Amino acid sequence: MHTVIIIGGGPAGCEAAYQLASDGIQVHLIEKNNETGGNLNNWYQLFPDRKNAQDLNKRLQEQLNHPGITLHLGMEPSRVEKDGQGRFSVSLSDGSLLEGDALLVATGFKTFDAKRKEEYGYGIYENVVTSVDLENMFRNHAIRTSKGDVPRRIGIIHCVGSRDEKVCNFHCSKLCCITGVKQAIELREMLPESEIFCFYMDMRMFGPGYEEMYREAQEKYNIKFIRGRLSEAAENREHQVQVKVEDTLLGRPLRVTLDLMVLLVGMEASNETQGMARELGVKLAPSGFILPLDPHYGNNLTGEKGVFITGCCSAPMNLTDTLNDARSAAVCITRYLNMK
Amino acid sequence: MYYDNFVLPFTIGLITLLVYLCVRYYKWIRSFPKIDRIKIRRGLFSRKTLVSIKEIFMESLLHHKIFKTNPVLGYMHMTFAFGWFLLIIFGKIESMVYHTSAFNPPYFAIFFRYFHPAKETFPGSETFAFIMDLILSFLLLGILLAVIKRFYSKMFGMKRTTKQRPYDLLVLTVLWLIFPARFIAESFSSGINGGGSFLTHSAGEFFATFLPLRNLSYGAWWTYSSLLGLFFLLLPFSRYMHIPTEIVYIFLKNWGVEQRKQYNGFSEIQTNACSRCGICINTCQLNNSCDIKDTQPVYFLRRLRNHEDFSVQSENCLLCGRCEAACPVGINLNAIRLSTRPDLTRVTKETYAYIKPKAQAETPAKVAYFAGCMSHLTPGIIRSMQEIFDKAKVNYTFIDEEEGVCCGRPQAICGNWKAAKVLMDRNQERIESSGAEILVTSCPICYKTFKEDYTLKIKIMHHTEYIDMLLQEGKLPLHKNDLKTVFHNPCELGRGCGVVDAPNHVLEQVSQRIPTRYDGKNSLCCGGSLANTVIDSQQKTKISTDTVKAYSAYQPDVIVTACPLCKKTLGKTSTSVPVKDIAEIVAAS
């Protein structure tokens, strides 16, 4: 019987593990945290259907109760070696050794560190939060300013750390647009009296139902979308955030005082993704994500034989695409093992 | 009468050269603004002239600055310049002692060995012969080094030597041949008639063993004279124009002539004073990080001189000033580059019509704080400065807290002085209305223009200087901690305005400062310069990455700088070592 080692227990790793195990393959799933789910653990509701993120998470976890899957929680691979027969041996942080016929990298993404965009004041101004912080606020059902008041005016800033050569990120993180729309709607539902602005460069509504949601946000939820990139933010004595932005559709400079500013942080390859790429000698794209062998026929393959990739370690993806990608990786691996 | 037709090429060449130079320099100086011409008149009979003569001796002859950068290269330049100088001086003295008159034609001293019958002795003739041979051997050694340098520049500690045009290579060859030609002519004469010393005499005896010297000697003198004459005729159109021009430049500079915003005769003089030593090539980060090899001052100035298209090179410069700091001639490279930048922007006075005068005047205070646009993009710096002001109980007003107007320098360095002036006037008005005694700014770019282009009558300080002053006055309580720091001195602050000691003092008092080879005026450019409109963001990132690498090699806990632009630029590529402003370090201690 064949064995596959999966590194990373986020949605991609979990789904791939289940698919492989269902095909009768022995799976070792390594996850650095004490629970699986990865970044999904930080999310409240999912777009486009507003499903509770934890429902999906729970389902993915339940799938792992398969006899073919061995979970290694709280573990990190300290060393990966490949022998002449193409077998992999992975040493874990507790000293144990796993052996497998193929390796699936599912180490995912990390969100952009908003402090690197100092002009937006994250970590300096009290009422600047990231989209991740906001999800946490949603879970606690408390949208409050630092003083504990209800924010009367909220601004959501798109493309923080994405499509921004000033932080060396040229890529689009793809999901922030729709996340912004989703979060604006959620905010509106919780704070019917507040004014909500989205400051964007482009609205990229690529998925099914996304464009409809964007339209609804404008028509039904009265979210104001302003095309223009934030230039700078300052904090006033009341700890409100004063932003300067140009409305590029009207060609007019704007100055808006916000009670709460939300930064839609982009996605970058996680440290583990970069570390695994180094360890395995796999190529990185200029964006820092792992470069697939071919963008059409080989997006789960790498230049290294027996090393497969899935999920956001190769590019920003929404959950629909991530789960698809995991199934696709499982198919690739099964075929690879059968031909061995 | 000592005369022979072969002296004609030399004499004609020399006279033509002198006439040409006089006309050229006169024309250039006449184009100076009146204020500079007055300065020349005042300086002419002052101590400044003596200072200039000393500098000419040290730099044009001994090449002391090149020595400091690179001893082998310095030696090479010195053998040429000082050697030739000594040969002329001692030759002249020798001819005067022999002739017992100062008034002999110039060629007489140069071709002394031809005219002087070897059997005739005069006081010290043997000593003179020995000295002249010694100097000649010294020069021949210099030529040998120059030939080696052309082919193996690495031996001189230069990654690259200047690439010359064919015409310059021709003149270079003529120059290289002059001294071997003199050596051959003198040796041949000595071989026939005797005379000379250890070098020419021995060589003469040696040549006589196998060459028909009687037939060759006269031709050798013709060759020597022709090479000299040819060199003099070609000189004004070659890079050797730097030899006389550097001397003129040293005088003008010491008399107080300045490179102004316009490209004028003084710029031409400096352009011609460049010896193309190539030191600037190795200091240029565009060369070292981006492999751009045509924009360094040596090539830019050559384009200017030869009236070739320089539009790209004019803009393709970070204006970091590293070349200027390293230039042994001391040419105002940044100012010249800036003076060639045409105003390509469409910004006019009307563009800024939307900037309304502030409704109320500034709150009167002792200190006016002007953060600058870039500091508004690094609010951490502003926050720290506010803390420092509060801690030291300073009575201050924040000029651009709500509404900032750009200092004008970004426009100015793109050639748009007219637009810059509008902004400058607006800021000046605001600053003056605060009635402050000191203007403190967090941005070295603003600082430089406040100092140089504004007409503010109050004290202008960068926050590094201001913090240093507060510390010296004991107004700022602080604690030294174990943080290991390296200091990246921003181009506009260190090289641009000469602020070198203040940041070092401050850092030494609050942290463990690690000295680096990039300290003070040797600092690197962060790559974020607003002055370069040619290179793209990836090339700027490459410079920034290399700079971070250079500082990280000292293994600091934090890279400290004193410029919001440097902080942002270095911060974007420095993922493992944090980059902070000196104000943030002080505020946190």
Image (cartoon, grey):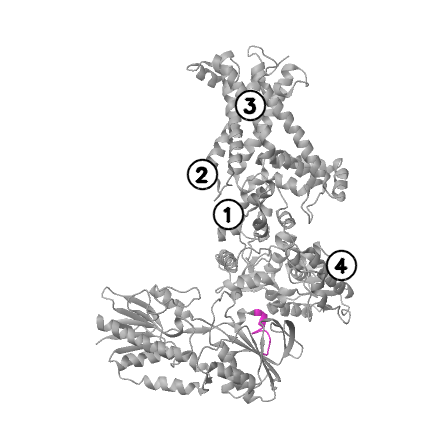
Label 2, secondary structure: give it: loop
Quadrant in which residue A320 is drawn: bottom left
Which of label 2 and label 4 is nearer to you? 2
Q: Is residue B552 above or below residue B364?
A: above
**In this rendering, position of residue B252 left or right of residue A222:** right
From which residue to which does the magenta span run?
A118-127
Within-10-Å neighbours for mark 3: few <14, some 14–19, many 20+: many
Within-10-Å neighbours for mark 4: few <14, some 14–19, many 20+: few
Residue placed under numbered mark 1 in the picture = B293
State the residue in front, B415 or A153. B415
Label 4, secondary structure: give it: loop
Q: Is residue B49 above or below residue B397?
A: above
Chief secondary structure of the magenta span?
loop
Mark before the other along the chain sequence, 1 or 4: 1
Q: Is residue A338 above or below residue B438?
A: below
Mark carried by residue B458: 4
Which of label 2 and label 1 is nearer to you? 1
Q: Is residue B566 above or below residue B38?
A: below
Is residue A123 found inside the magenta-colored segment of the image? yes
Mark before the other along the chain sequence, 3 or 1: 3
Residue at mark 2 to residue at mark 1: CA–CA distance: 18 Å
